[in-house]
Image (cartoon, rainbow, N blue to C red):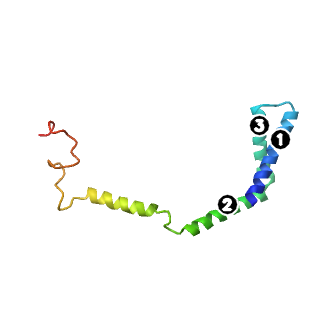
């Protein structure tokens, strides 16, 4: 697994940088933050191969998962279609609906005392 290898390389770089900073007299959270930044920079500049291999592995894994699920496996599109039909049915006036603004209008939020 290239991702594990790259992660271990980065963790080792952070540990080495932290020890070097500790030996230099810097301690506490500032030393840890500096070690993380140093590890990030060194791994980005010096370990391009393992980083690219990890990125390719992640991209291949995502593509396999997408292909295994199929185009509409999540059901999100089906839910959206049902919701669209419900909204269309609720907003379009049909022969069985009273015209908007009438006494039987369900959208009329006024109380009976406020109505003319």
| Circle number at residue 17 | 1
Q: Vertically, is 5 above or below 29?
A: below
Secondary element type, mark 3: helix
Q: Residues within 10 Å of mark 3 (few under 14, many from 20)?
A: some
| Horizontal side of residue 40 vs 105, given as left or right | right
Q: Earlier in the sequence, mark 3 or mark 1?
A: 1
Q: For mark 2, what is the residue? A: 58
Residue at image position (14%, 47%) is 103
Residue 42 screen position, x and y as percent: 80, 47
Residue 12 visible in image = yes
Determine the image quadrant of residue 55. bottom right
Q: CA distance from mark 3 to mark 1?
A: 9 Å
Q: Earlier in the sequence, mark 1 or mark 2?
A: 1
Residue at image position (32%, 57%) is 87
Residue at image position (75%, 33%) is 29
| Circle number at residue 31 | none
Residue 52 visible in image = no
Q: Are marks 1 and 2 in contact (CB under 8 Å)?
A: no
Q: For mark 3, what is the residue? A: 32
- Disc count in the image? 3
Q: Residues within 10 Å of mark 1 (few under 14, many from 20)?
A: many
Give whichever of 44, 2 is nearer the camera. Answer: 2
Q: CA distance from mark 1 to mark 2?
A: 27 Å
Q: Earlier in the sequence, mark 2 or mark 3?
A: 3
Give whichever of 2, 53 is nearer the camera. Answer: 2
| Horizontal side of residue 95 vs 17, given as left or right | left
Q: Residue furthest left?
A: 116
Secondary element type, mark 1: helix
Q: Are marks 2 and 3 in contact (CB under 8 Å)?
A: no
Quarter of the image with the N terminus is bottom right
Residue 112 screen position, x and y as percent: 15, 39
């Amino acid at each position: 697994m290239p991702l594990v290898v790259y992660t271990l390389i980065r963790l080792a770089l952070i540990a080495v940088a932290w020890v070097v900073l500790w030996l230099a007299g810097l301690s506490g959270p500032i030393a840890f933050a500096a070690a993380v930044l140093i590890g990030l920079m060194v791994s980005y500049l010096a370990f391009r191969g393992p980083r690219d291999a990890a990125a390719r592995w992640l991209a291949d894994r995502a593509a396999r998962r997408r292909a295994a699920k199929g185009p509409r496996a999540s059901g999100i599109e089906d839910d959206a279609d049902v919701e669209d039909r419900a909204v269309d049915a609720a907003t379009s006036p049909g022969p069985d609906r009273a015209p908007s603004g009438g006494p039987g209008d369900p959208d009329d939020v006024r109380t009976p005392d406020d109505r003319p």
